[in-house]
Amino acid sequence: MARSFLFLLGSARKDGNTELLARAAAEQLPRDTDQRWLDLAELHLPDYYDARHAADSWPQEESDEALLWEATLAATDVVIASPLYWYSVSSYAKRYLDYWSKWLSTPDPGFKAKMAGRTLWGVTALAHREEEVAEPLVLTLNHTAAYMGMRFGGVLLGNGSRPGQVLADERAAVRAKTFFAQEAPLARFPYEAE
């Protein structure tokens, strides 16, 4: 099956360090690899309302939810490109993932089964030299993939706060060259045996 990448940009800054790092990694993909880029900050996606166990129905309002749902299902590889905000994913990325809860029941109760076996990746820029501070973000994505029965390719980390600063991170540049070429293992929760 041909790979198809969905890059979801979750930064509050246009052309930010996370996007630059994601694009550097994407440049290494084979030329015939399908890539779709969506900027979550530019899409209209209301705050998530959980109606799974309520008498109310899901709120119906104009949004880009259907576009995101269709793009997600069309991808073999979903890349959450979110800067490290308060040690986790941005609010844009979190809102998108919250909608996965809805998609588990509507519009498609088969959403989880369809996502199983696909690969979730992360790309993030952080302002710390100590990369372990990004562990909450890594765990958020790993656990999401584990719950969905997906593979998890890990998180490409780069250092940068000021615009363009990540381009000076030589370690990140080296990792970006092979990041999407690695074989992504099936995601597991920490309590699951190897």
Image: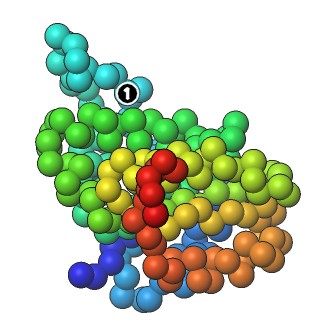
Furthest residue toward top: 55
66 versus 102 height, above or below: below
- Foreground residue among 13 and 95: 95
Residue at image mark 1: 48
Q: Residue at x 27, y 59 (%)?
A: 116
Q: Residue at x 33, y 78 (%)?
A: 3
36 versus 192 height, above or below: below
Q: Position of residue 7 (x, y in %)?
A: 45, 62
- Foreground residue among 88 and 14: 88
Q: Is residue 70 visible?
A: yes
Q: Is residue 42 left or right of residue 73?
A: right
Q: Position of residue 121 (x, y in %)?
A: 49, 63
Q: Residue at x 42, y 89 (%)?
A: 31
Furthest residue toward bottom: 31
Dot 1 amino acid type = Tyr
81 versus 185 height, above or below: above
